[in-house]
Structures are given as structure tokens and as C-alpha cells.
Amino acid sequence: MSQDNAHYLKTELYTLLNQESEIFEFLQAGSLDGLWYWDLENPTHEWMSPKFWTLLGYDPTEKQHLAAEWQELIFPEDLQVALNNFKQHCQDPLHPYDQVVRYRHKNGSTVWVRCRGIAIRDSSGKPVRMLGAHNDVTALKQTEEALRRKNLELEQLALRDPLTSLYNRRAFSELLEKELARSIRYQTPFSVAVINVDNFKTFNRNQGFQAGDQMLYSVSKTLLSVARHSDTVARLAGDEFIILMCQASLRESKIAGERYRTSIEQLLGQRGITVSVGLSSFTAPSNVNSALLSQLSEGVVTQASRALDGAKASGKNRYAILPTDTQS
Ligand SMILES: Nc1nc2c(ncn2[C@@H]2O[C@H](COP(=O)(O)OP(=O)(O)OP(=O)(O)O)[C@@H](O)[C@H]2O)c(=O)[nH]1
């Protein structure tokens, strides 16, 4: 198929533009990056203005004005959306043929194009041609994407501790409330471990604050590496960490608490670092008012903190559990 074969469409379009003010106004409605004119009675033929091909990085003179040429470059899922709209617009002129679609540029990048069109119908109302316009909206989409990423980053910053990248207290509270709600709904237990570095003031004093920061980072990495994948490790403040152990019973929490303690001792003990661990388990009562959720979750953490005080008071580098102090 040569360009000349499709030339009758161009001639016809120019005539149409001269004769039909409505068509002319449609074209005026936006700043255009391409025009297309499609013969629906012979749908392989579609005239595309050169600007469209330049936009996609192609030499317009290499193109043969076949519908298949753009259909090869559009993202398949976007082609489906466009074809659905096309079908509906042909059946009902009030259904807009208007969508943003993605094309593959010759250099592999993505070009976002708003593609609008109107069917031109014969006297019986049957669509015989389709006239359309392209607008390059890539820059807009890129700005939207950059904003989306920035928002995500800000959201992450609000939820993460900057020194260790662990969840912060606020994020932890939200996750704890969710776990509490799940625990009540499915009647499963969960446990919390509050972990505090022993004698950290002395470490800071002897080694310096920067070495202290590095140590807190090492503690966070060690805790992350020994916590179960489904558990949540967070930094509450200063030298205090907390771990939410999903679906862990009292017995399992004691095993985990001891694991946290020993892993820190094994990895960082030579540098004078140990931790004390306070544990608390929650078993859901069958009937709980959901308004009490945040009170209940605070209660679990307070109980684990009290257990931690007990562990510190009885010599540090150990775990303790409440309500029953079952150090073993
Ligand atoms: N390097 C560093 N130190 C911090 C940071 N936040 C808090 N600290 C220090 O951590 C220490 C916490 O000390 P405490 O937990 O009160 O006391 P401790 O010496 O650990 O004593 P015990 O907890 O009873 O074993 C304080 O000296 C704080 O200044 C931080 O981000 N970086």
C-alpha cells in the first residue's frame, strides 16, 4: 500500500474542513499533536498527519497510512479501551471517543497521548468515517508520576525512623491497632516485645554519639534479621525498639524474646551491647467494643514496658513477661 492509495482520504478531509463548520470547530478545540481520518468502510485505510509519527520518533514518509501501523505501537490494554470506546461511540454518538493512551516511542520510551474522535455518519446515521485528534500529554503524565512518587516518599518519611529506616512509633501504633482488631475478629493471640539497650548512656559516653548511632543501626538490623517475616519491628524512641509478633502465643513470645536477646548478645556482646526484653501477650476476649481498640493496644504496650522494667531491675540482659513474670 503506497501513500498515494490513501491520498483520497486527505483530499476528502480537506474538502470536509472547508464545508463543515462543526468539524472545523472540533479541530479548533484543542492544540493538536496529530490528526487522523479513518475510512470505516475500508478500515485498513487511515490517514495520519505527519506530526503524529514525528511525535513517536518515526519518519512520516516511511508510513503507509494503515490503521495497523498505530495499532502495533499502542499498548495492547490501551488499544482495548480505545476499541471499546470506538464501538460504543459508533452505536451512540453521545458516548465520547476520548481516552489517554500510551504509545511506544521508537527509542523505547512511553508517549502518553490523549486521543479524541468523532464519527462522521451517512444519512442513515451509519458511521462511515472517523475523524480524530491527538494531544501529547506525556509531560503532564510525567509530572503526575513524579508527584505520586514524591507523595509516597513523604508518606514513607512520616512513617519511618530516619536513623534505622524502621517503622516509627506512629506507624507502629496503627499496625498494632490493626493486629488487635484482627486478633479480636479471628480470636487469635498476638504478642509484643519492648526491647531496650542496656547501659546505652555509658556506651554513648565512652564511644561517642556517632558510634552510638551506628550501634542503634546494628541493633535494628539484628532485630530485623531474627524477627519473623510477618512480624513488625519498630523504633519507639532513643535506644528502645518494639516488635509486634502476629499470632504469637505467650509460649511462642518467650521463645522469640530469648531469641532477640541472644542474637544481640552473640553479635554485639563483644562490643559491650546487650538488651533487656519486656514481653506481653494478648488473647482477645470474645466481646470487645471497637471504640476500646486504641486503649487496648496502648495497654498491651504499657504492660510490655512494665515487664521490661522488671527485666532491667532484675539484672538486665534478660527477658521478663507480664502479666505473669515467667523468666525461665
Ligand atoms: N547515639 C544515640 N543515642 C541516643 C539516641 N537517642 C537516645 N540516645 C541516648 O540513649 C541513652 C538512653 O539511655 P537510657 O535508656 O535512659 O539509660 P541506659 O544507660 O540505657 O540504662 P538502662 O536502660 O537502664 O540500661 C541516652 O543517653 C540518650 O541520650 C540516638 O538517636 N542516638
Image (spheres, rainbow, N blue to C red):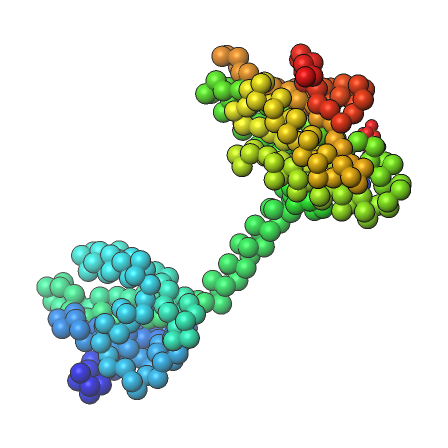
User: Quick check: which quadrant has ligand 1?
Assistant: top right
Placement of the N terminus among the 4 image quadrants: bottom left
In the rendered view, does 181 fall on the left or right side of 28? right
Placement of the C terminus among the 4 image quadrants: top right
Residue 274 vs 59, above or below: the answer is above
- Comparing 198 with 110, the one in front is 198
Name the residue located 52 percent from the left edge and 24 percent from the top edge: 247
Q: Quadrant of residue 209?
A: top right
The number of numbered discs placed on residues in the rendered structure image is 0
- Comparing 147 with 117, the one in front is 147
Residue 117 drawn at (x, y percent): 28, 66
- Comparing 119 with 278, the one in front is 278
Which residue appears farthest toward the right when viewing the image? Answer: 205
In the rendered view, does 9 fall on the left or right side of 216? left
Residue 93 drawn at (x, y percent): 22, 59
Residue 277 vs 111, above or below: the answer is above
Which residue appears farthest toward the left when viewing the image? Answer: 124
Residue 239 in view: no
Name the residue located 70 percent from the left edge and 39 percent from the top edge: 267
Q: Quadrant of residue 235?
A: top right
Residue 73 in view: yes
- Comparing 253 with 189, the one in front is 253
